[in-house]
Image (cartoon, rainbow, N blue to C red):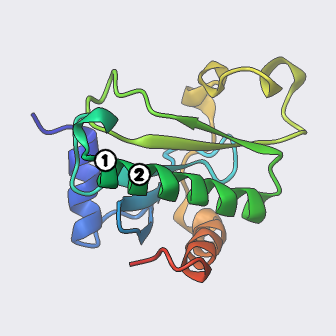
Amino acid sequence: MPTLIHERVRKCQVGEYPKAICRLSSGWVVLGDVQFLRGYSLLLPDPVVPHLNAMDAEARKRFLTEMSVVGDVILEVTGAVRINYEMLGNVEPALHAHIFPRFEDEADELRLKPVWLYDWDNAPAFDASRDRDIMLAIAEGLDRRGLVV
């Protein structure tokens, strides 16, 4: 059953997904739909699989390593204090890794809590012109590390 993740990967493959940052060997780095935490990105596997355990050992290792390097780059680009990684797949039963930068200046009631407590409905939506620079910086950081395909 095709999911939103399948659709986004298909659009990345044909150059029609505006939030696509770059292609890595394990999949696509894309900017999140909302940017309540500047630089929030996802790694979408290509090909899409239902969950991490559906990958063979080598693909799994590559996906998780590249996910962590995306986190390294986002730390560098945003000045975040840490990265939160999440792979849930409950709503969209297709593997996708959320990569959330966390900042010292987040509101006290949210700073140490899961990002799902943020008001997603009223968060700043992706804006191609506003987010262009951060997308380029992430792509350049990954390219410097030799990961961009």
Mark 2 near mark 1, Cβ–Cβ under 8 Å? yes
Q: Is 134 left, or right, of 50 in this rendering?
A: right
Quadrant where the image shows the C terminus: bottom left
* Residue positioned 50% across, 55% down in the render: 65
Q: Kindly report the distance in space between the C-alpha atoms of the residues bearing marks 2 and 1.
A: 6 Å
Counting the numbered discs, the total is 2
Between residue 121 and residue 95, name the one nearer to us: 95
Q: Position of residue 90 (x, y in %)?
A: 34, 21
- Residue flagged by tag 2: what amino acid is it? Lys
Q: Residues within 10 Å of mark 2 (few under 14, many from 20)?
A: some
Q: Position of residue 61 (x, y in %)?
A: 41, 51
Q: Position of residue 87 (x, y in %)?
A: 45, 33
- Residue flagged by tag 1: what amino acid is it? Ala
* Residue positioned 33% across, 37% down in the render: 52
Snapshot quadrant of residue 3: top left
| Vertical position of residue 9 compared to residue 56: above or below | below
Mark number, residue 61? 2
| Vertical position of residue 106 compared to residue 11: above or below | above
Q: Residues within 10 Å of mark 1 (few under 14, many from 20)?
A: few
| Vertical position of residue 74 compared to residue 64: above or below | below
* Residue positioned 45% across, 42% down in the render: 97
Residue 83 can be seen, yes or no = yes
* Residue positioned 46% across, 57% down in the render: 30
| Vertical position of residue 57 compared to residue 141: above or below | above
Give the labeled residue for mark 1: 57
Q: Is 41 left, or right, of 7 in this rendering?
A: right
Mark number, residue 85? none
Q: Position of residue 148 (x, y in %)?
A: 45, 76
For label 2, the SS is: helix
Residue 31 can be seen, yes or no = no
For label 1, the SS is: helix
